[in-house]
């Protein structure tokens, strides 16, 4: 790996870290709720208060940014990871049970991480799939060659087999 490429990677990583730190440190996310406020909001949410649910979600968005920052260099944009993590946070808030004795942040952090990991696994599967419209090279004139161009059509296969059989018979 050349020095130029290593410098480029280092700069990209630094920019990502600075962006994420600014996102977390700035006023992009509200401050977390105190323990008392969180407990009150959880009780209100269990009573059917939609605003309490929304408040719990909004005030735990910093947790999303904190959890997803360790997946920042896995091939998915930071904004996308935060969106996916927010889905995990929503699932965590909706399924949290105070009676189990865990803190909301602990439970939601696991939900966020699971959601991000599911996304990354899904992306990995999609990367291994190949489309017949994928470019596989260029011809002598510089035109792009697609996998579809190289694959034989249904009509060409019997003709090619016949020609090969005749050529094999003639040469024997």
Image (tube, rainbow, N blue to C red):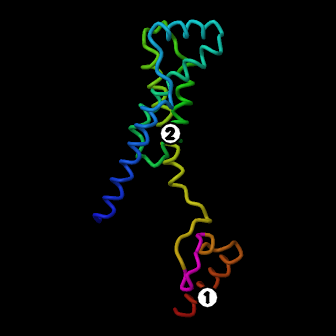
- Residue wearing tag 2: 81
Q: Which mark is residue 166?
A: 1
- Residues drawn in magenta: 139-147
In the image, is 88 to the left or to the right of 47? left
Residue 95 appears at what percent x and percent y? Answer: 56, 18
In the image, is 18 to the left or to the right of 146? left
- The number of discs equals 2
Task: Residue at 48% x, 42% y: name it.
Answer: 78
Q: Are marks 2 and 1 in contact (CB under 8 Å)?
A: no
Task: Residue at 50% x, 39% y: name it.
Answer: 81
Task: Residue at 52% x, 74% y: name it.
Answer: 137
Could you tell me which quadrant the N terminus lies in? Answer: bottom left
Is 145 colored magenta in this rendering?
Answer: yes
Residue 146 appears at what percent x and percent y? Answer: 59, 71
Q: Nearer the viewer, residue 50 or 99?
A: 50
Task: From this view, report whether residue 13 is shown above or below residue 136.
Answer: above
Mark 2 to mark 1 CA distance (whole Å): 58 Å
Secondary structure state at the residue bearing disc 1: helix
Secondary structure state at the residue bearing disc 2: helix
Q: Please, which residue is most extreme toward the front here?
A: 27
- The residue mark sitting in front, 2 or 1, is 2
Task: From this view, report whether residue 1 is shown above or below residue 124.
Answer: below
Is 141 colored magenta in this rendering?
Answer: yes
Residue 125 appears at what percent x and percent y? Answer: 51, 48
């Amino acid at each position: 790996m050349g020095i130029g490429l290593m410098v480029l990677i280092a700069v990209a990583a630094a920019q990502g870290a600075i962006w994420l730190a600014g996102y977390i440190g700035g006023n992009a996310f509200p401050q977390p709720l105190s323990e008392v406020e969180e407990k009150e909001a959880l009780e209100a949410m269990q009573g059917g208060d939609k605003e309490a649910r929304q408040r719990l979600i909004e005030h735990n968005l910093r947790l999303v940014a904190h959890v997803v920052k360790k997946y920042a260099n896995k091939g998915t944009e930071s904004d996308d990871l935060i969106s996916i993590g927010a889905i995990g946070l929503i699932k965590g808030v909706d399924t949290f049970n105070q009676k189990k004795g865990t803190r909301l942040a602990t439970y939601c952090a696991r939900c966020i991480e699971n959601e991000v990991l599911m996304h990354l696994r899904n992306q990995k599967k999609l990367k291994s799939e190949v489309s017949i419209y994928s470019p596989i090279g260029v011809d002598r004139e510089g035109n792009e060659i697609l996998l579809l161009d190289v694959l034989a059509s249904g009509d060409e296969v019997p003709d090619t087999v016949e020609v090969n059989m005749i050529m094999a018979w003639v040469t024997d």
